[in-house]
């Protein structure tokens, strides 16, 4: 796009002829064209390079930003969440048949080593007595002490239970002795005490200072009589 060169008008020197006026019109046309191109300007390419630059071509603004330096490696981020469980594998082969377990006999009385086993008990069976002691039946169907006692030591006491509901109100107690008699003192300028309500004082309708002083002194007298205002 051509650049506009100013004429540099000088009073009473530069002629206002067709050539100079045409040059002015060319400048106005160039300004209008530039404004129209700017209003229709769109973003073209945006890249990075060693030297930043900008140019306008075909109504598009092409920008080259300076490529920033590579920063330091940041700290590792937090560990990711655990993945989902995998699918269940196929069932394994059946195991070998187990041996027959021993029979347990629970008796309601205390037993001792060398005592006779309960009826029906055979070698290898176990007997649990009322004290929690475990005995094993030998080949002679007598009891051998295993040294095992499934009755453990007493556990710690549990926590206190919740407070129960409030019971019904009890009977009324006897009337107590009367308290000390209290006499309310008269009020003074330094002691709080009881006073009477002052006698009513009608609103003043005085029209001069003498009448107003008379009404005010009457109010003061009633306050002193009631004990609200000190006499001296």
Image (cartoon, rainbow, N blue to C red):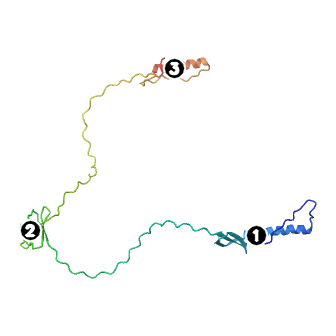
- Residue under circle 3? 220
Question: Looking at the image, is 190 positioned above or below residue 162?
Answer: above
Q: Nearer the viewer, mark 3 or mark 2?
A: 2
Q: Marks 3 and 2, how far apart in space?
A: 113 Å
**SS for callout 3:** helix
Looking at the image, residue 75 lies above or below residue 208: below
Q: Position of residue 150 (x, y in %)?
A: 17, 63
Disc 1 to disc 3, C-alpha distance: 95 Å
Q: Residue 143 bears which disc, if any?
A: 2
Q: Quadrant of residue 115?
A: bottom left
- Write down the quadrant of residue 157 in the picture: bottom left
Element type at mark 2: strand
N-terminal of the pair, mark 2 or mark 1, is 1
- Looking at the rendered structure, the secondary structure element under dot 1 is helix
Q: Nearer the viewer, residue 30 or 147?
A: 147
Cβ atoms at labels 3 and 2 below 8 Å apart: no
Q: Residue at x 59, y 18 (%)?
A: 211
Looking at the picture, how far across and down is residue 41, in whole percent?
A: 71, 70
Across and down, in percent, residue 100 comes to 16, 77
């Amino acid at each position: 796009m051509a650049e506009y060169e100013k004429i540099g008008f000088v009073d009473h020197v530069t002629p206002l002829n067709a050539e100079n006026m045409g040059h002015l019109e060319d400048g106005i046309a160039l300004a209008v064209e530039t404004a129209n191109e700017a209003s229709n300007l769109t973003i073209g390419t945006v890249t990075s390079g060693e030297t930043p630059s900008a140019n306008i071509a075909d109504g598009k603004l092409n920008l080259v930003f300076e490529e920033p330096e590579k920063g330091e490696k940041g700290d590792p981020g937090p560990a990711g969440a655990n993945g989902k469980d995998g699918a269940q594998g196929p069932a394994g082969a059946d195991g070998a048949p187990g041996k027959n377990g021993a029979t347990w006999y629970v008796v309601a009385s205390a037993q001792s080593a060398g005592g006779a086993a309960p009826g029906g008990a055979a070698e290898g069976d176990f007997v649990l007595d009322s004290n929690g002691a475990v005995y094993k039946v030998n080949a002679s169907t007598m009891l051998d002490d295993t040294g095992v006692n499934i009755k453990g030591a007493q556990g710690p006491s549990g926590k206190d239970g919740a407070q129960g509901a409030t019971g019904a109100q009890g009977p009324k107690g006897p009337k107590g002795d009367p308290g000390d008699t209290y006499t309310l003192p008269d009020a003074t300028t330094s002691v709080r005490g009881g006073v009477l309500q002052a006698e009513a004082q009608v609103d003043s309708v005085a029209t001069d200072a003498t009448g107003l002083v008379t009404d005010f002194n009457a109010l003061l007298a009633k306050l002193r009589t009631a004990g609200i205002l000190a006499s001296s």
